[in-house]
Image (cartoon, helix red, strand yellow):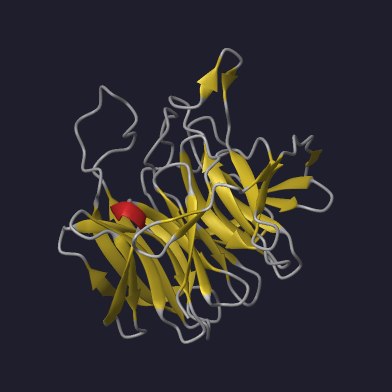
Amino acid sequence: MKIQLLVLFVSTISSTFLLADSNGWTKVFDKACEFTEGPALAPNGEIYLSDITFSSKCSNKYGQMTGRVWAYNPLTKKSRIVRQNSGQSNGLYFTKEGHLIAAEGASYGGRRISWFNPKTNEYRVIVDSYKGRKFNSPNDLVIDKKGRIYFTDPRYVGHEMLQIPIMGVYRVDGPGKVTRIISSILRPNGIVISPNNKTLYVAVADNGGINWLDIGATKIDPWGQGGIISYDLKSSGEVENPRIFVDLKKQGGVDGMTIDKKGNIYATVGVKKRPGIYVYSPKGKLIKVIDTPNKAHPTNVIFGKDGKIIYLTIDGTSMWAKKIY
């Protein structure tokens, strides 16, 4: 495995701009270029998030940016860049050893699953292809108790040619060892595993296009449509018994998700009438809706270290926090 040492430009910015809106949210970060995604809880309590620098939005005379990863410290209220060239990372997830696993997307991105050590800046590629073909645009990921990685591979943005005709869900058993476990979902997005590791949940968000930043493309639905599919997750890492967990009845799509210790799903739902974090019980019953700040389109959500505060990324440059317990 080739190891690359990244030279990082590290910047520290004071979060003196904290703002609250009518829904009780507080803006804790607002320094992204275009699109915040993939918040992840680090072992030290920091919240890492992806700054997706779409090529058509975040370029200058030197060329296109290729994404950044920021870290927000809830204690100091400060943010810093921890990866200056993130391969257009989207979903992020920390291993129990404190290493950052990233789903790198398209639009001049890596289109791979990578490993990064925040303490040493060491970087490695875990997998970047399936049967010799580059992934479409890895979107989100989760790790089970055995250390296996599960990730979704749709395509929403990017000029690169699609080499895999299926937008699937994959399992990674080790460097270069990848298996497609789900092939029947159109644009799988967020992905989580139940606390007992027996159920895999996959969000669906289909907006009808493969590059919605292309101004010449056919008009698509900015809110999308979809829901959540659940599967029995076997100890072998295979899935079976697919069933509809949430059906939004073509009213919107589900992006990122997180899950609490009770197994309740917190899903970022893009419904035009009421976008928000929709909380579902393990049986699929809607428990409550947490409205987004200023009715913004939500992209992903994660709990803080104390389990009482949730952090929400939205379609834009910011991340927000709200105490819910």
Q: Residue furthest top?
A: 61
Residue 89 visible from this viewpoint: no
The percent position of residue 41, horizontal first and vertical second, equals 62, 64
Which residue occupies 50% across, 43% down?
135
Residue nearest the viewer, comparing 225 with 148? 225
**On the picture, is 246 further left or further right than 304?**
left
Q: Residue at x 60, y 38 (%)?
A: 87
Looking at the image, which residue is at 37% across and 41% down?
Answer: 156
Considering every residue shown, the one lying at the far right of the view is: 120
Residue 297 in the image: above or below residue 261: above
Q: Which residue is drawn at the image coordinates 66% and 46% (left, top)?
A: 14
Q: Identify the image quadrant of residue 5.
A: top right
Q: Nearer the viewer, residue 323 or 67?
A: 323
Task: Look at the image and tell me whether residue 83 can be seen.
Answer: yes
Instruction: Find residue 26 and report its horizontal and vertical position in percent.
Output: 47, 59
Query: For residue 69, which quarter of the picture?
Result: top right
Residue 164: x and y in percent read 42, 42
Say if 64 sits above or below 294 in the image. Answer: above
